[in-house]
Image: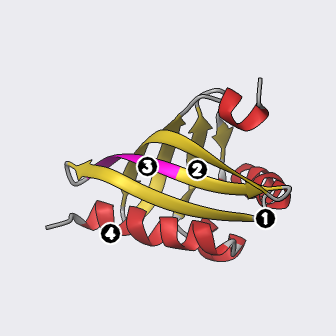
Amino acid sequence: MSTDAEDVVNRFLAAWQSEDADKALAFFADDAVWHNMPMDPVIGIEAIREVYAQFAGSMDGLRVEVHLQLSDGTFVMHERTDHVSMGGKEVSLPICGVFEIRQGRIKSWRDYFDMSRLTGS
């Protein structure tokens, strides 16, 4: 049985894949932090919107595959693979994601992954 926090994450990931910025960003708290660990953290909904636009602009498509997910009711942690299409090529990126959910919204989102899978270096 999934927790309410897991439900928020699952619905968010569905919205994230749809590439509808407003739909995806509605899941974030105004002061949320999104931290892709190889990069600097992005703080606040407007900054997250800007980075989202950069990511969406560089992708032709995204499919998220969650392999394992667990939650304590506030934090949701999962192993997933993001299948990203860019320039006619698909890159599969293994990720460990950690979400903190407060009052039904994403307060923080941390993704741990190897950036060289995206950059080719």
Q: Nearer the viewer, mark 4 or mark 3?
A: 3
**Residue beneath disc 1:** 60
**Sooner in the amino-acid sequence: mark 1 or mark 4:** 4
Q: Which amino acid, by three-letter code, is at mark 4? A: Asp
Q: Where is residue 61 in the image (x, y as percent from the top left)?
A: 71, 65
- Report crowding for label 1: few under 14, some 14 to 19, many 20 or more residues within 10 A (C-alpha): some
Given residues 49 and 6, the one toward you in this image is 6
Q: For this view, does 20 lie left or right of residue 30?
A: right
**Residue beneath disc 2:** 31
**Sooner in the amino-acid sequence: mark 4 or mark 3:** 4
Residue under the image location 77 percent in, 60 percent down: 56
**Residue beneath disc 3:** 80
In the displayed orientation, state which residue is furthest to the left. 1
Residue under the image location 70 percent in, 70 percent down: 21
Q: What label sits on residue 7 in the rendered view?
A: 4
Q: Which amino acid, by three-letter code, is at mark 3? A: Arg
**Sooner in the amino-acid sequence: mark 2 or mark 1:** 2
Residue under the image location 43 percent in, 49 percent down: 80
Q: Which amino acid, by three-letter code, is at mark 2? A: Asp
Q: Nearer the viewer, mark 3 or mark 2?
A: 3
**Sooner in the amino-acid sequence: mark 3 or mark 2:** 2
Asked which secondary structure carries label 2, the reply is strand
Q: Nearer the viewer, mark 4 or mark 2?
A: 4
Q: Position of residue 116 (x, y in %)?
A: 69, 27
Q: Nearer the viewer, mark 2 or mark 1?
A: 1
Q: Can residue 39 be seen in this view?
A: no
**Sooner in the amino-acid sequence: mark 1 or mark 3:** 1
Q: For this view, does 14 lie left or right of residue 47?
A: left
| Circles 2 and 1 in contact, beta carbons < 8 Å | no
